[in-house]
Amino acid sequence: MAKKWYPVVDVLSCIECGTCVNNCPHHVYDKEKSPSPVVTNPDACIDHCHNCGNHCPVGAITYVGDDTGWIPPALQGKQQNQPQACGCGCGCNCTGGRNS
């Protein structure tokens, strides 16, 4: 678990599609508020996991404590539905990476 790593949603860019909420295997978001992405459990976020941000179709998610140089795929001009590695290494249904 991360104390200095968690997602921040840009409410001006967010389209409230629920993709981040539905793709977070760590229960960081309040499912009852979906599709609005409300971070209610930031301590459950895994250090260096970018899973929700990699799935956000508009690139509205950044992370407190991100020193990796990660840029949301939607802002890199990549296809929105292309799966990206989350980088957390938690063993959940994410697509792998490291665990810090």
Image: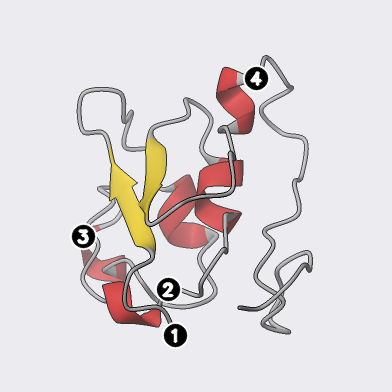
Q: Which residue is mark 1?
A: 1
Name which of mark 3 and mark 4 comes first in the sequence. Answer: 3
What amino acid is found at the position of numbered circle 2 in the picture? Cys
Say if 9 sits above or below 23 in the image. above
- Give the Cα distance between marks 1 and 4: 28 Å
Say if 32 sits above or below 81 in the image. below
Q: Residues within 10 Å of mark 3 (few under 14, many from 20)?
A: few
Q: Which residue is mark 4?
A: 76
- Which element type, helix, strand or loop, lies under badge 1? loop
Evaluate if marks 1 and 4 touch, with contact meaning CB atoms under 8 Å apart.
Answer: no
Q: Which residue is mark 2?
A: 45
88 to the left or right of 96: left
> Who's the residue at 21% across and 33% down the image?
11
Measured as percent of width and height from the top left, residue 2 is found at: 40, 78
Q: Which residue is mark 3?
A: 33
What amino acid is found at the position of numbered circle 1 in the picture? Met
Measured as percent of width and height from the top left, residue 63 is found at: 39, 51
- Which element type, helix, strand or loop, lies under badge 2? loop
- Give the Cα distance between marks 3 and 1: 23 Å
- Give the Cα distance between marks 3 and 2: 18 Å
Foreground label between 3 and 2: 2
Evaluate if marks 2 and 1 touch, with contact meaning CB atoms under 8 Å apart.
Answer: yes
Q: Quadrant of the C terminus?
A: bottom right
Q: Residues within 10 Å of mark 4 (few under 14, many from 20)?
A: few
Say if 6 sits above or below 37 in the image. below
